[in-house]
Amino acid sequence: MSMKTKELKLFLAVGIGGVLGALPRYIVAESVSFLSFPVGTTIANLIGCFVLAYVTFQPFFKNKLPPYIFTAFTTGLLGSFTTFSTFIAESVLLLNDSIEWLILYFVIQIFGGVGSCFLGAKLAISKEKMV
C-alpha cells in the first residue's frame, strides 16, 4: 500500500469516525437540554475521557486493530463525541450567570475528566494483567 493510499485511508477513517461520534454527542446534549446546567457536555466529556484512556491503555486495541480503525475510533469518533470548544463556550455563558456555577463546571470537567481517564486506564491495565 502506497503512502498516499495509507494517508487517504486514515483521513477517511477519521472523517467517518467523526460523523459517528457527533451523532451520539448531539443526542446526549439534546436529551438533557431542558436543564440549565451544561450536563450534556459534561456527560459526553467524562464518558469520552474514560473510553479514550481505556482504549489507549488496553494493548488489545492498539495491537489487534488496524491503525486506521484505531485512529477512526480515537481521533474521529471520540474526538467528535467530546468537545472542548463547547466546554469553553458554555463556560463563558456560565460566567455571565454565576461564578459559582462556572467554578462547579470547571471542577466537574477537569477533575472528573482526569478521574475518568485514571479509572479507564486502571481498568484497562488490570484487565491486561488478568489475561
Image: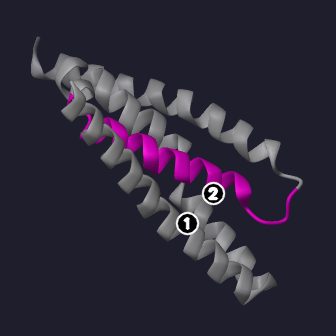
Q: Is residue 107 left or right of residue 5?
A: right
- Label 2: few (<14), some or many (≥20) within 10 Å? many
Label the magenta part by its dominant secondary structure.
helix
Q: Secondary structure at mark 2?
A: helix
Seen at 42% across and 35% down, the residue is: 76
Quadrant in which the C terminus appears: top left
**Disc 1 + disc 2, Cβ < 8 Å:** yes
Question: Does residue 47 belong to the magenta stretch?
Answer: yes
Cα–Cα gap, marks 1 and 2: 6 Å
Q: Is residue 98 above or below residue 113?
A: below
x then y, percent, for residue 89:
64, 68
Quick check: can you spot residue 6? yes
User: Which residues make up the magenta segment?
Assistant: 35-59
Seen at 30% across and 27% down, the residue is: 70
Residue beneath disc 2: 42
Q: Is residue 122 left or right of residue 128?
A: right
Q: Is residue 2 left or right of residue 81?
A: left
Instruction: Name the residue nearer the viewer: 28 or 54.
Output: 54
Q: Is residue 115 above or below residue 101?
A: above
- Label 1: few (<14), some or many (≥20) within 10 Å? some
x then y, percent, for residue 66:
23, 18
Quick check: can you spot residue 53? no
Seen at 81% across and 49% down, the residue is: 32
Give the total of numbered labels.
2
Q: Secondary structure at mark 1?
A: helix
Residue beneath disc 1: 109
Dot 2 amino acid type: Thr
Q: Is residue 74 above or below residue 49?
A: above
x then y, percent, for residue 43:
63, 51
